[in-house]
Amino acid sequence: MDTTQQMQQTKSLRDMGKKLTQATLMTSPFKCDKCNNTGFILTTNDNGYEIAKECECLKERVKSSRLSFADIPEAFRDITVSSFDLSLYKTPEGKRQAEIAKKLCSNYIKNFEQMANSGKGLYLFSNTKGSGKTRMAVSIANALIKHKNTPVKFTTAIRILEEIKATYSDNNKSESDLLAAISRVDVIIFDDIGTENPTPWVKEKFYSILNERLINGKVTMFTSNCRIEKLNLENRIVNRIQKMAIPIKFPEESVRGYIAEKENENYMKMLLK
Ligand SMILES: Nc1ncnc2c1ncn2[C@@H]1O[C@H](COP(=O)(O)OP(=O)(O)O)[C@@H](O)[C@H]1O
Ligand SMILES: [Mg+2]
Ligand SMILES: [Zn+2]
């Protein structure tokens, strides 16, 4: 690298440092004396030029800011695909489906680069609530953030639409900025689609978000209580979801009851002592 290149790199690193500092890192819980919380260390090279080096703390800062950007519910912050418990499913069919779903999801993460290049996400579905769809979607988000260095946004269709509505009454926020941000984020997860009975306005917004993401080749994931073809949405939306996501069937079995049962068993043992 010649000196001009080096100076340019230093400048762009500095700009990047400033942006990161202003945008997200100011609120990050990290304190670093080495770089004064800027994420960059300035040193002088052999030619007497000042160059910027990334500080060791930067990777951790970015990871932590991504985790808070993702909006993952507090209770789900640390769950993983590998701790997805197959023994909770009682019927042979449920066990089998859970096992396949777990395998498909963990292989999806392994092959994420290729999937992302083709803009392919996942569509996790089953009619029964409490079968583990949201838990799995969040585990995938955690893995992509922590191990694939990918920004992920976890949300529900309803929440996004509320955020859009909120821009109408807030002079500091614009709908187009928000929509642009939603179309740009690498991975977005829409939890629980298909349950609402959408108004025409909602359908229009949801369509334009999905269409933008499809055109930009971004990864979109869904959890839903019905198969794609049965979604209570227009054909043009259904068609786009079919293009952007691979369907994965979850068991028709709620594990909520079993989890409560297991928990109570443990307390019972304690009380019996
Ligand atoms: N395979 C699993 N292993 C461990 N916990 C699970 C599993 N499946 C579901 N749960 C837990 O059961 C509850 C309901 O699961 P959830 O993912 O919300 O279901 P769904 O989204 O299908 O309605 C959550 O508390 C979740 O953490
Ligand atoms: Mg759910
Ligand atoms: Zn530092």
Image: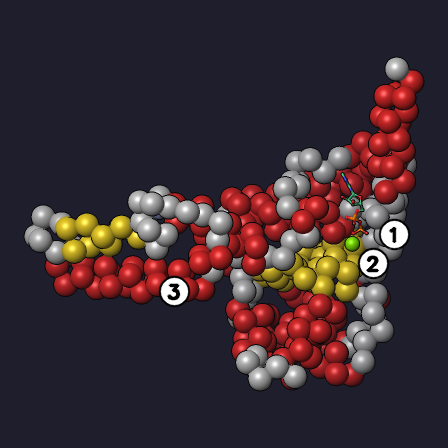
CA gap, disc 3 to disc 1? 45 Å
CA gap, disc 2 to disc 3? 40 Å
Instruction: Work out whether mark 2 precedes mark 3 in sequence or the reverse, and give the earlier one.
Output: 3
Give the residue type that dot 3 points to: Lys
Provide the residue designation for mark 1: 128
What residue lies at 68% left-to-right and 70% top-to-bottom? 160
Q: Position of residue 52 (x, y in %)?
A: 24, 54
Q: Is residue 116 visible?
A: no
Question: Under tag 1, what secondary structure?
Answer: loop
Q: Are marks 1 and 2 in contact (CB under 8 Å)?
A: yes
Give the residue type that dot 2 points to: Asn
What residue lies at 9% left-to-right and 53% top-to-bottom? 48
Assess mark 2: CB under 8 A from ligand 1?
A: yes
Question: Under tag 2, what secondary structure?
Answer: loop
User: Does 79 sit above or below residue 63?
Assistant: above
Crowding around mark 2 (Cα neighbors within 10 Å: few <14, some 14 to 19, many 20+) is some
Color scheme of the displayed model: secondary structure
Q: Position of residue 35 (x, y in %)?
A: 31, 49
CA gap, disc 1 to disc 2? 7 Å
Provide the residue designation for mark 2: 225
Residue in front for this viewpoint, 37 or 173: 37
Crowding around mark 1 (Cα neighbors within 10 Å: few <14, some 14 to 19, many 20+) is some
- Quarter of the figure with the N terminus: bottom left
Q: Position of residue 146 (x, y in %)?
A: 53, 45
Provide the residue designation for mark 3: 19
On residue 7, which mark appears? none
What residue lies at 29% left-to-right and 59% top-to-bottom? 13
Q: Is residue 73 visible?
A: yes
Instruction: Report which quarter residue 83 is drawn in.
Output: top right
